């Protein structure tokens, strides 16, 4: 069985784009692989959140991932900061990470522009910590988006460098896990581009029915087709893409036919789309609200996850220490 690991940024609520982009696949994948999912709360310190914000967002992410169907009895779900072995591996890997390659990293160059008053060493070594996350469980596959591929490439470099330096074949080379055709990209409702937190156009799993109706009714459209079977502008294609994800095939076909016959009423389509999104998200929303009230259960899940993750991590650290030469005298 392959070891799959994914790190989750500890900020923001989940929106439909997150769900269809990754989570749905995680939920299916957890049964076929040995999966580790963790919340990257050490990483989030690179932006200096307050303790209160850090705590709140980690808890919320945990709740939302559980609500979406990650099963703590099947996969290992944990908080990065519960596994200090990760920090030790990070320290060890830092000795073989070079300033030049860290400075050349695209995400570092972007970050130092974004937060010029806080160019901390954690930002520079962010890819080393990420490599430690991945290598601590000797992972084979890492599901990542395009923006993380360079980090994964760096992880492979660190792993190979370690193997070469100590003349061992210890760390496997982690590969990007691509969902390929299963990956559904959810666009925003503002005419162009994807749904995203920074884009400010998200429909969140925790949104109330009222919020969803408002957001959908505000979606950008145009004045409608004038010729039969007219090519669709992006804003309208986007509505159909979301509808495809949440509505029945019949519903999609109905509005597609209307469009092609130049009889579409976008108001009707939006009303239907809003109701179908609500129907799709409400079970998640209910679970999120339930879990939010169940601290005892959450505590149990977090503790058990930490324990499982630490078992695997401790084994790696023990072996790495021996390879490096930290042995009993
Ligand atoms: N850098 C990732 C992101 O911003 C989060 C992350 C941290 C991660 N450690 C990881 C992802 C290890 C995959 C594997 O999304």
Image: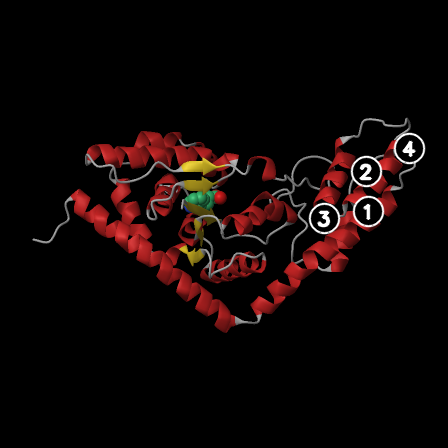
Q: Earlier in the sequence, mark 3 or mark 1?
A: 3
Q: Secondary structure at mark 3?
A: helix
| Nearer to us: label 1 or label 4 | 4
The answer to whether the residues at label 3 and label 4 have Cβ atoms under 8 Å apart is no
Gap between marks 2 and 4 measured at Cα: 17 Å
In the rendered image, the vertical position of residue 313 relative to residue 174, given as above or below: below
Q: Which residue is mark 4?
A: 261
Mark 4 Cα-neighbour bin, 10 Å: few <14, some 14–19, many ≥20: some
The answer to whether the residues at label 2 and label 1 have Cβ atoms under 8 Å apart is yes
Gap between marks 3 and 4 measured at Cα: 23 Å
- Residue at screen point 65% across, 64% down: 286
In the rendered image, the vertical position of residue 110 relative to residue 251, given as above or below: above
Q: Looking at the image, how many numbered discs can be counted on the residues?
A: 4
Gap between marks 2 and 1 measured at Cα: 10 Å
Q: Which residue is mark 2?
A: 221
Q: Nearer the viewer, residue 55 or 309?
A: 309
The answer to whether the residues at label 3 and label 1 have Cβ atoms under 8 Å apart is no
Q: How is the image coloured?
A: secondary structure
Q: Earlier in the sequence, mark 2 or mark 1?
A: 2
Gap between marks 3 and 1 measured at Cα: 13 Å
Q: Which residue is mark 3?
A: 246
Q: Earlier in the sequence, mark 1 or mark 4?
A: 4
Q: Nearer the viewer, residue 193 or 2?
A: 2
| Nearer to us: label 3 or label 1 | 3
Q: Which residue is mark 1?
A: 270
Q: Earlier in the sequence, mark 3 or mark 4?
A: 3
Label 4 CB less than 8 angstroms from ligand 1 = no
Q: Earlier in the sequence, mark 2 or mark 3?
A: 2
| Nearer to us: label 2 or label 4 | 4
Residue 290 position, x and y percent, is 60, 68
Q: Nearer the viewer, residue 118 or 275?
A: 275
């Amino acid at each position: 069985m392959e070891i799959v690991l994914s790190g989750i940024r500890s900020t923001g609520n989940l929106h439909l784009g997150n769900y269809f982009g990754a989570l749905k696949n995680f939920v299916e994948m957890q049964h076929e692989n040995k999966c580790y999912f963790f919340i990257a709360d050490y990483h989030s310190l690179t932006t200096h959140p307050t303790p209160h914000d850090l705590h709140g967002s980690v808890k919320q992410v945990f709740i939302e991932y559980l609500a979406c169907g990650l099963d703590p009895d099947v996969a290992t779900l944990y908080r990065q900061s519960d596994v200090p072995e990760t920090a030790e591996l990070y320290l060890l890997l830092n000795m073989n990470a070079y300033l030049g390659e860290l400075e050349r990293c695209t995400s570092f160059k972007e970050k130092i522009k974004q937060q010029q008053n806080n160019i901390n060493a954690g930002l520079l070594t962010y890819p080393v910590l990420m490599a430690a996350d991945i290598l601590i469980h000797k992972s084979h596959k890492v599901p990542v988006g395009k923006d993380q591929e360079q980090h994964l490439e760096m992880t492979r470099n660190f792993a190979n460098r370690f193997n070469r330096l100590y003349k061992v074949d210890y760390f496997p080379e982690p590969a990007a896990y691509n969902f390929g055709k299963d990956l559904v990209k959810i666009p925003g409702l503002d005419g162009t581009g994807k749904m995203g937190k920074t884009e400010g156009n998200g429909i969140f799993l925790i949104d109330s029915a009222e919020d969803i109706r408002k957001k959908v009714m505000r979606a950008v459209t145009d004045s409608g087709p004038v010729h039969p079977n007219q090519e669709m502008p992006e804003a309208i294609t986007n509505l159909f893409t979301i509808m495809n994800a949440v509505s029945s095939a019949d519903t999609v076909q109905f509005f597609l036919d209307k469009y092609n016959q130049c009889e579409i009423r976008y108001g009707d389509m939006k009303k239907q789309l809003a109701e179908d999104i609500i129907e799709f998200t409400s079970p998640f929303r209910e679970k999120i609200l339930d879990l939010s009230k169940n601290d005892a259960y959450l505590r149990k899940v977090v503790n058990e996850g930490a324990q499982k993750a630490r078992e695997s991590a401790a084994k790696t650290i023990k072996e790495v220490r021996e390879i490096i030469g930290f042995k009993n005298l």
